[in-house]
Amino acid sequence: MFADQEFMQRALALAERGRGWVNPNPMVGCVIVHHGVVVAEGWHERAGAAHAEAMACAQCTPEVLRDSVVYVTLEPCAHTGRTAPCVDLFLRNPPKRVVVAMKDPNPRVAGGGIEKLKQAGIPVETGLLEKEAARLNEIFVKYVTTRLPWVTAKCAMSLDGKIATYSGHSRWITGVEARQATHALRHAHDAIMVGSRTVLCDKPQLTTRLEGVEGRNPIRIVLDAEGILAGNDEVFPDRTQAPVWVVGNETLSWPFADRVMALPENAGGVDLQVLMKRLGEEGVTSVLIEGGGETLSSAFFDRIVDKLCFFVAPKIIGGRDAVTPVEGIGVDHMSRALQMCDLQCRSFGSDLCLEAYVDQNGSFSSGEERGA
Ligand SMILES: NC(=O)c1ccc[n+]([C@@H]2O[C@H](COP(=O)([O-])OP(=O)(O)OC[C@H]3O[C@@H](n4cnc5c(N)ncnc54)[C@H](OP(=O)(O)O)[C@@H]3O)[C@@H](O)[C@H]2O)c1
Ligand SMILES: [Zn+2]
């Protein structure tokens, strides 16, 4: 039904409000509709706060709830966590119908909430705007099913595909709107990762600075296998903003590091799959990789990237020695190029953002192609 879709779209928009704040939980939105009129709305605001269904149910009387249709973007929970199970709200006051966008992907609960509602005789429909709901919670879905962080690769490049000038200068390639979008990406991820040369060239803060709204700072992770930043006391002067973790050799020391992680290496440096596994075990649900070119190359060739967000500015930088988004050696044959899918484009001021997902069935990885 068209109206069903509209109400679910509203529930998805409400869910979006929790982005960044709810990790490691999913974003969830809920709309209660009484005779075609929205009478209550809820969303999960922060991890530990009320669930979307509880927030919405608190806004209507039991009588109204029993005479309403409930739209919720994720299967209502059936287990007691930090809050009581949401299905109980509906078992106490059964609505006329419950429309669910997607099942809870957590293998331990999948289907349990829906089953309980059905057993109580409540009509439940599942799958409305399911793809949109899964996309909204792509970080949560991957983490809860694999315990690996979701990885987004980000860069800002010129129209001719450079992320810096030949001298290493890169501030700024894109305009203020695109840079705000980058801060929104930082807010949405648990960790941000860069290569040592980026830190050396740009001295970035890697914090979230959203105009007019509060944001969350991710953990800052620096790959510095050779230790070119060891002993450097000029970078990350804002130590209290967010932790800095260095992936490097334990025998060296970094004055700005809150932690040093020593990890096994492969042909191209630290094995990033091992790093992701370790981060996942420690509860990091998502990583935003902000370059530079060598780091993004390792990330793509180690097959850890799920999605890319490449901002493109209408500028030409030129220069055969200017760094490109993905350096390394690259593939030798087009048949080995990494296949991306669902390519989309959004505008930010005079810049574009190209978004695409890695086709996880594609080829691309082969030891000898790794960049050194
Ligand atoms: N426009 C943008 O979006 C953007 C973003 C970031 C950077 N940049 C620009 O890009 C340039 C820097 O890029 P870059 O390609 O030269 O360097 P980079 O990727 O920032 O850093 C390269 C270094 O990171 C370390 N590294 C990367 N992958 C690793 C792995 N798997 N294991 C261990 N260490 C790893 C290596 O350190 P070791 O050598 O110690 O092994 C490597 O030398 C700068 O000019 C910067 O301004 C632009
Ligand atoms: Zn719940």
Image (cartoon, rainbow, N blue to C red):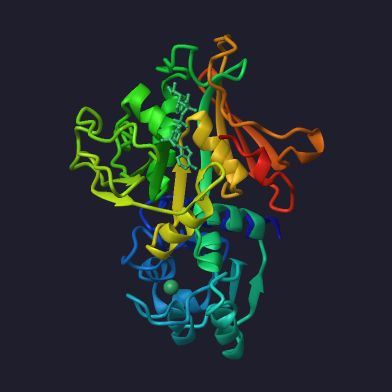
The answer to whether 124 appears left or right of 251 in the picture is right
Is 344 in front, or is 239? 239
Is 246 in front, or is 42? 246
Tell me if residue 99 comes above or below residue 112 in the rendering.
above
Residue 296: x, y in percent? 53, 36
The answer to whether 29 appears left or right of 247 in the picture is right
Tell me if residue 171 comes above or below residue 70 in the rendering.
above
Q: Which quadrant holds the N terminus?
A: bottom right
Residue 282: x, y in percent? 37, 63
Quarter holding residue 185:
top left
Residue 268: x, y in percent? 55, 41
Tell me if residue 275 comes above or below residue 356 in the rendering.
below
Residue 20: x, y in percent? 39, 50
Q: Residue sitting at 52 percent across and 29 percent down?
A: 293
Outermost right residue: 335
Q: Which quadrant holds the C terminus?
A: top right
Q: Residue sitting at 66 percent across and 72 percent down?
A: 125
Q: Is residue 34 visible?
A: no
Outermost front residue: 251
